[in-house]
Image: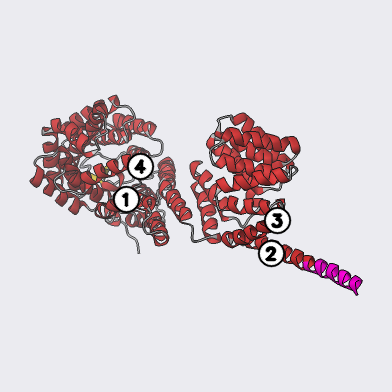
Amino acid sequence: MKKYVIILSVLSFTITNCVFAQTATQKFETAKELNDKQNFAEAIIILEDLLANELKNDEYFQELAYTYFNLLDFDKASEYYKKVIELNKSCAICYANYSRAEFEKGNFEKAESIANEGLELDANYSLLYMTRGLIYLATNRKELALSDFNKSIELDPNEDDYYITRTNYYIQINELYNAYSDVTKAIKLKPQNPQYYYYRAFILTNLKVHDEALIDIDKAIELNNNNVNYYNLKSTILMNWGKYEEAEIVIYKSLELVPDDYNAYLALSEVYLALSSLERYCEVVDNAIDLCPTSELQKVEELKMWKNMYCFDDKLSYYTSRAFAYHLKSDYGNAINISKQGVQKLGASSLLYDVMGSSYLARKEYDLAKNCFDSCMNINELTVKEISECYGLNISPQNAEIIAQTYHIRAEFGLAIIFLTKNDYKSAFLHIMNVINKAEKLENFANLELLYITKGLIYLGQKDIANAEAAFKIAREKNLYNPISRVNLAMLDVLKITNSKLKKLKFEYEGVISCSRLIVPDVKLPKNFDLELLDPALEMCTFATEMSPKNPVPWLYLAKILQLKGDPDYCKAAQNARDYGLYDSFTEIKADCK
């Protein structure tokens, strides 16, 4: 009987321990499953319960360390990885993660020492090289960092994270093509990771490859449409591409996700400035100011400066910015009205007189335009002061002076155009020569070719064919991409070979080309005229329409030459001229089109 009791007791003890062992195993598997599902808080409860019974189980410590590592609690992660290594010195991944935890805490020297210990244990463990590479990079040892990143990829070429790590390295040293290559390899390994497309879009944006960047960021959004960073980058791509209206839509989408996103409001304010939608700019800039983080207080001061300039009607910049915006949109009536309001409230302004003159000129109200340009010229001494006020506090006196000279040139150029339209060639010539002399002295003066085109037209009005041709050729040399100098040469060629009498030539300002043009004269072909002589002029005008297919002037001159050749396609060319802005094109060339 006694022997039976002893046997029964041993059997009971064995069964109890088996049950306990199975329960612990199941709990541990459950903890690992919870970690896989990122339910870290629940995993910690189970793991700490397990460790209460087995304080020297390295697997439990390792899983707990991994849990805290994912929670970014690097203090506890370090503590538990250190404990694992004490229990199991052969755990290479523990050295890697222990080193990474100390790295994240900023303990670079300690992190490097741990990584080196791990590599002594296993010289072919790729994660240790990647981790040490990060330490080298953070401590400005870039060549050593690249060597370790390369080694980690060599040991494990199918680990996408290693390529992303090296991608970030290449971005930091501005080797964007290498960064592009690495992130592309990562995408091939994990094509469903939206973050990788986001990285590549960022790289392409900095390479100014906007179309491909847009494709990648759209792919990132397709895979994850709830990440505000993706929408912010997309808006940046569109803004860099000049597609501000599309950028505006994307920014509002990001604000749906994060209503108080400072970066979104900042981008939105930049969009409205670029679009010259100043009222809307004034509505959103306050949001950007209120939400600006303390780390960017300097930006707040800048935003307040721009708000002060554009949002209060006691500032000249309030009126000039709106007047220029209306003028650029061809809303000349509002450009004139807002300019008048500014003059009435703040007094005479050379900038406002300039935009008023330009707007009247575009409406072909030449006498009113002349009055404005004369007023502008009479108060030129105000221009530098006004530019300093309207262009921001950071503009240097030297740059303000240069910009002021461009305004003076614009005003006098306007006067030259007006005298040309009035056939006062002497006055027009004096003004255009003065303007050209001033413009030639300025470095990188924009649209210099327009001045020489005008000079050529003045010569043409004076029946000086040779000098007109020379001026048009100089204009072509100044800007090979402006088709107007070419079509003027073509029309000049037509006038020469048809022996047309240069009487009653008429000129008018054309806003669509920002210059004067010759009203198409009524050319008569001599008897037995060889139509093939028109081919060089025809070729020049055809080329000009291909250069600038939406510019109406080349189409109008092409229509005239085709009409002279008896080609019925002249009606299509005249229609194009009309469609693109020359609404009297059929009347001007006396077209007989059905």
Name the mark on residue 27. 2
Q: Quadrant of residue 416?
A: top left
119, 248: nearer the viewer: 119
| Residue that mark 4 sits on | 296
- Mark 3 vs 1, N-terminal side: 3
Q: Which colour assignment does the render follow?
A: secondary structure
- Mark 3 vs 2, N-terminal side: 2
Calculate the distance from the C-alpha at mark 4 to the C-alpha at mark 3: 51 Å
Q: Please, is residue 127 above or below residue 476 in the view?
A: below
Can residue 330 be seen here? The reply is no
| Residue that mark 3 sits on | 54
Calculate the distance from the C-alpha at mark 3 to the C-alpha at mark 2: 13 Å
Q: Please, is residue 216 above or below residue 430 in the view?
A: below
User: Foreground mark, 2 or 1?
Assistant: 2
Q: Residues within 10 Å of mark 2 (few under 14, many from 20)?
A: some
Calculate the distance from the C-alpha at mark 3 to the C-alpha at mark 1: 55 Å
Q: Amino acid at mark 4?
A: Glu
Question: Residues in magenta?
Answer: 1-16
Find out whether residue 352 is within the magenta segment: no
Calculate the distance from the C-alpha at mark 4 to the C-alpha at mark 1: 11 Å
* Residue ID at (72%, 53%): 57
Tell me if label 4 and label 2 are in contact, CB under 8 Å. no
| Residue that mark 1 sits on | 288
User: Foreground mark, 4 or 1?
Assistant: 4
Q: Amino acid at mark 1?
A: Ala
Q: Amino acid at mark 3?
A: Glu
Looking at the rendered structure, the secondary structure element under dot 1 is helix
